[in-house]
Amino acid sequence: MANGNPVFDRLNKQIEKERYAGFGTPPPQGSPYQGTQATSAGYGAQQTLSADQLNEMYARQSAGPVDTGRVTLDDVVMKSLGLFALLVAAGGVTWFTVDKTPSLASPLWLGGMLIGLGLGFAIAFMRKVAVPLIVLYAVVEGVFLGAFSYTINSIPKYQGVPMMAVLATVCTFAAMYAGYAMGLIKVTSKTRRMFIIAAGGYMIFLLLQFVLQITGAVGGWGIGGSGGLGIILSLLGTGLAAYSLAIDFDSIDHAVRVGAPRKYSWLLAHGLIVSVVWLYIEFVRLFARMRD
C-alpha cells in the first residue's frame, strides 16, 4: 500500500498495535489452557493437559474474522448497502419536497454540497472512526443529490440527464468491479501515487472553478464551458472517479487480507459512497455538456 492515504496509514498502525493483542494475558478460569505455562521453577513444575482436554482443543473450529473482530467482505458490503439506501431515501424525499416547493432547490443542493464537503474532510482526518458522521454524510449527500438532480432535470434541454447518469454510474461500477476482479484493472503503489496527485490537482481545479462561478467570473458549467475543452475536462473527471472505485476495491481487499479491525468497515463503505457520488456528478456534467 502506498503511503499518503490517511485511512490506511491508521489501519496499518492499528494492525501492528493489535497484532499481539491477548498474548501474555492470563487464560480465563476453567480454560483448558490454564496451568500449562511453565513456572519460575522450570519445566518440571509445568502441569500437563489430559487426553480429553487435548481432544476438545483439536475439535474446536478455528476462529474466523467475525470471531476475532476483523474486517470481512460481507461486513463492508452490508454497511455499503445500508449507507447507499440512506442516500437514495434522502435523495427521493428531497426530490419530492423540491417538486412541491421549487424555491428550496438551490438552498438544499448548495447547502448539502458544502456541509457534505465539511463532513467528508472531518471523517477523513479524525483519529477515530466516527460512525454517526458517516451516516450523516450519506443523508446529507442524498439531500444534495436529490435537489441537484431535480434542478438539472427541470431544465428542458437537460431533461433525462440525471437518469442517464444513474445508469452510467451503475454500469461503470459493475465494469470496474469485474475488471478489477479479473485482473484487467491493476492497482499498484505507482498507480496509487499517480491517482493521488491527479485527483488532488483536479479537486483544486474544481474548487477554483467553484469560486469563479459564484463570483460571476465564469458561467454555465465553468471553465471550458460546453465546448471541446469542457468535454475533455469532464472525461478526465469521469476517468478519475471511475479509477477511484478500483482504488476502493483494492483497499477493501487489502484490509480483509491483513485483518484490519472491524470498525474500519464503516470507513471502507464510506469510501465507496464518496466515489459513487463523485462518479455520478461527473456523468451529469459530461452528459449535460454533450447536450449543449
Image (spheres, rainbow, N blue to C red):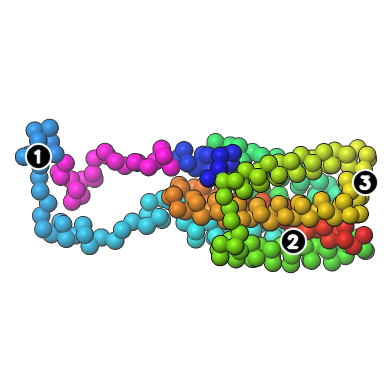
Residue type at numbered disc 1: Tyr
Q: Is residue 78 left or right of residue 31?
A: right
Residue type at numbered disc 2: Gly
> Where is mark 2, residue-wise?
92
**Disc on the earlier residue, 2 or 1:** 1
- Closer-to-camera residue (270/195): 195
**Disc on the earlier residue, 3 or 2:** 2
Q: Is residue 98 visible?
A: no
Residue at 37%, 54% in the rendered image: 67
**Disc on the earlier residue, 1 or 3:** 1
Question: What x and y, as percent, mark residue 276?
Answer: 68, 56
Question: What x and y, as percent, mark residue 65?
Answer: 40, 55
* CA–CA distance in space, label 1 to label 3: 82 Å
> Where is mark 1, residue-wise?
43
- Mark 1: give few (<14), some (14-19) or many (20+) Cα within 10 Å: few
**Residue range (magenta):** 15-37
- Mark 3: give few (<14), some (14-19) or many (20+) Cα within 10 Å: some
Which residue is farthest top?
Answer: 40
Residue at 71%, 41% in the rendered image: 200
> Where is mark 3, residue-wise?
219
Q: Which mark is residue 57?
A: none
| Magenta-drawn stretch contains 114 | no
Under circle 3, the secondary element is loop
State the count of labels. Answer: 3
Residue at 12%, 32% in the rendered image: 40
Looking at the picture, does residue 290 appear above or below residue 33?
Answer: below
- Closer-to-camera residue (207/232): 232
Under circle 2, the secondary element is helix
Q: Is residue 211 visible?
A: yes
- Mark 2: give few (<14), some (14-19) or many (20+) Cα within 10 Å: some
Question: What x and y, as percent, mark residue 71?
Answer: 47, 52
Q: Main secondary structure of the magenta part?
A: loop
